[in-house]
Image (tube, helix red, strand yellow):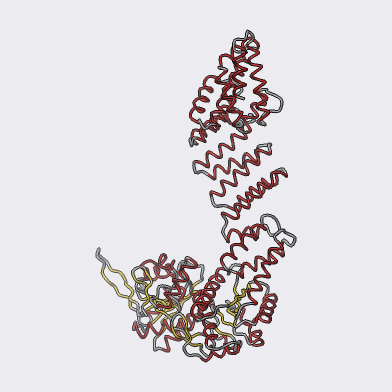
Amino acid sequence: MTFLLRQTICSHLHCSRPEKILNVFQRIHLRFFQACGLASGRTSSASLRTATSDRLLHPYAASLLLLVSVFVPLNLGETALAQTEPPGHQSERAAQIIIEQTQALIETHQYDAAAASLKTFLAGYPNSGYVDDAYLLLATALLRNKQATEAIFYLEQLMADHPSSPLVGRARLLLATAHADLGNPDQALAILAEARSLEDSVEIKRDALKLSGEILITKGDYPHAIQSWLDDLNLAPEDERAEVRARIQSLIKDKMDRKALHRLRDTYPTTFPGDLALIRLIELYTMKGEDHQAERNLRIFLNRFPVHDYAPTATESLKSLKGRLKASQFVIVAIIPTSGRHSRFGTEVYNGIKLALEKGKETLGLTSIGLIVIDSETDKTLLHFQLSDAIAEYKPLAVIGPLFSRDLPLIAELAEKTETPFLTPTAALADVRRLGTYLFNTSTSFFQQAHRMADYAVQYLGYTRFCILHPDNTYGQELARLFAQEVRQFGGEIIAVESYKETETDFGAQIRRLKAEDLKRHGRAKTVPMSKGGTRVVYEPGFDAVFLPGRSSQIGLLTSQLLFYDVKVGFLGNSTWNAPDLLRVADRTIEGDVFVDGFFADSPNPTIHDFVVRYRLRHQTDPTSFAAQAYDATRLVLEAVTRGATSGRAIRDQLTRSPDLPVLSGPAAFGPNGTLDRKLFVIEVKKGKFVQVD
């Protein structure tokens, strides 16, 4: 083609009719544009402008234009036009050729040359009909050359000087791109929203939606990115929808974590892309070995998409999971919240159970243990049915759960009827045995915490007088009552008890009442001189410590205000203090103070250290007390099996009678009320860290 073009141009170069050269050029130009899909039988300036505005020229067409510019100098075209057309037409034809040349420069990545040419064009042809094309091409060259700020200037110039130009829509898209490149995604998204609302062109709307999705991805806003692309999908012709679907599928597979996938699954429960979210969740849970979550999502998928192409695969996967359980030597059931607002607690418990099963396989020789997980947050009638069905079909050794005291009466009768031990790792109810002989509790009870704290404060610290400041809820009231009871058992004295609402931040009234009560007994108010003259009354507490069984987020407020009111005594806490945020909110106000808990991740105890290391390796975070207590519950069941128990009744008897059950904190035993009597740790706040002291 290059040879043909050279021969044709050279053969007519000295022709006495220059317009003939132009006609030859136009015919070749037209044919090549048609071959490249950029013209439809016309070579008018309007058709060329459409090609310019909609997208840059095809590379091959651009190369031809560049080649023509070499063999047909601009002054030759001007000479020919001068003889055949009025001067205005001659100028526009020259402008058109320059625009086409710069397109070719851009397509060959010669951005500096293209920008220089276009700036010269704008200076030399200020009134040309191609000025808006020049602005758009110049902005394109600058953007590709990473000069977004300058590109914005020319795009805004185009939109201000040529508001009715057909290129304004494309200018908005480029303007949004420039702002995104400069790190202004919100401004870019606002411009794209304007483009969608103001433009009639479906192509512009679709490009704006696609670009919006890409920018939203950079912000990590995957749900809105998907919504943008779904809007694009609705506008796309049938033959282009597969590409949009593939784009959404790629985002779901490559970017979205489980939390985002759950949200997407629930946002589009029975439509695309809810099906893709479910499939991806099934894949992730299967890879992680979380069979209960894989099974749950498989059942959800089959319920919502029964005729989907993936439905046969989902059915086979369910059969495979069930087959593996059937083949297990032993089975354990867990009742935990896998959905709803308590699901994070369920995850912690599940992690503890799984770690205990893995440890059991390694050290106890139990190589085949299946785990069935039932969501406790479902309808109670359905929960009872699912639990009964699982016990009847799989004959589990025991059930770990439920987590909450409110659910224990629901399962107590079933436990007795089926002779299946139920071990709750977290329920606050201390006396579970009053509900049935097959119920056990491995959580750290309120009584144990109150007893251990009172014992340490009186026997080790030598404290004898106490005040209590507690939240006004069932939890706070019970701990306050038990602590006061245990202090008196050890011969101590309770000076005053005050409560506060969980929403309160100013505790001045309660503290003043504590001081007033203390001043009636042992407290003193001394008048002391001030350095600058005068005197002030200083309060000297007549008690040794304040027990503060509150949320860790409120402890800092309480202790700082107690010190402000001259209540300079020891502060005592319970397991709610065992939280990293306490060290941030309380800072130095609790330095040297102590609290108790049944689990301490930084304990030097080798058994706990091994558990924590394993947990961190598996989950990249520290275990909570819920995870530790679930680990203990599962471990006790497995230990009973190694000691010869093979039935629910035998496991119950082992748990009830053994005086040295192996739990993380050391040998323990279940008391008459079904609660595990374990050693509780005393933990001190020392130099901004938690340190085990006993």
Establish if 196 lies above or below 81.
below
Which quadrant of the figure contains the C terminus? bottom left
Q: Which residue of the protein is positioned furthest toward the top in this rendering?
A: 16
User: In the rendering, at what x and y percent does residue 26 appear?
Assistant: 65, 20
Q: Which residue of the protein is positioned furthest toward the right in this rendering?
A: 307
The residue lying at 64 percent from left, 27 percent from top is 49
User: In the rendering, at what x and y percent does residue 236 appear?
Assistant: 70, 43
User: In the rendering, at what x and y percent does residue 484 appear?
Assistant: 45, 84
Q: Nearer the viewer, residue 371 or 517?
A: 371
The residue lying at 40 percent from left, 77 percent from top is 606
Q: Quadrant of residue 338?
A: bottom right
Q: How many marks?
A: 0
User: In the rendering, at what x and y percent does residue 460 appear?
Assistant: 35, 84
Q: Nearer the viewer, residue 150 or 49?
A: 49
Q: Nearer the viewer, residue 663 or 682?
A: 663
Q: Nearer the viewer, residue 533 or 555?
A: 555
Residue 262 in sight here: no
Q: Quadrant of residue 571?
A: bottom left
In this picture, residue 478 sits left or right of residue 458? right
Establish if 490 lies above or below 56.
below
